[in-house]
Image (cartoon, rainbow, N blue to C red):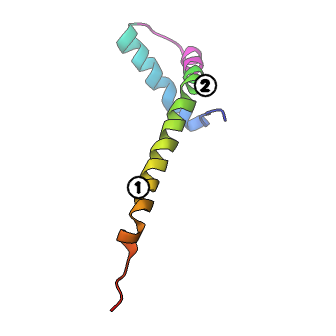
Amino acid sequence: MPITLNKEQMADAIPAVQRYVEEELDLEIGELKARFLIEFFAKEIGPHAYNQGVDDAEAYFRAKLEDLRGTCFEPKD
């Protein structure tokens, strides 16, 4: 499943990438190059970050599920 950004997300990301490249690499890039970089990272790194998020969520919910009885148990009188 490809990672894509909507128009608003891309509009926020482009200046952030431009600022990063200028501050860290001492280069100025235009909107098109920033967009290409974002699309590249979304394609190449996005799935790894997404999968890590899914793994983290699964671990969290598994831990909560293991303690379900302790969390929800109501003793009989």
Decide: few, some or many residues near mark 1? Use Cα within 10 Å; few <14, some 14-19, many ≥20. Answer: few
Q: Quadrant of residue 74?
A: bottom left
Q: Quadrant of residue 28?
A: top left
Give above or below for 4 relative to 44: below
Decide: few, some or many residues near mark 2? Use Cα within 10 Å; few <14, some 14-19, many ≥20. Answer: some
Q: CA distance from mark 1 to mark 2?
A: 31 Å
**Looking at the image, which residue is at 61% across and 37% down?**
6
**Looking at the image, which residue is at 53% across and 14% down?**
30
State which tag comes first along the sequence, 1 or 2.
2
Q: Position of residue 57 (x, y in %)?
A: 47, 48
Q: Quadrant of the C terminus?
A: bottom left
Label 1, on which residue? 63
**Looking at the image, which residue is at 59% across and 34% down?**
5
Q: Main secondary structure of the magenta part?
A: helix
Please provide the residue range marked out in magenta: 27-37
Q: Does the magenta run of residues contain 11?
A: no
Q: Are marks 1 and 2 in contact (CB under 8 Å)?
A: no
Q: Does the magenta run of residues contain 28?
A: yes
- Amino acid of disc 1: Ala
* 23 on left or right of 51: left
- Amino acid of disc 2: Lys
Q: Nearer the viewer, residue 6 or 55?
A: 55
Label 2, on which residue? 43
Helix, strand or loop at mark 1 = helix
Q: Position of residue 2 (x, y in %)?
A: 65, 32
Q: Quadrant of residue 69?
A: bottom left
Helix, strand or loop at mark 2 = helix
Give above or below for 46 relative to 34: below
Residue situated furthest right in the rendering: 1
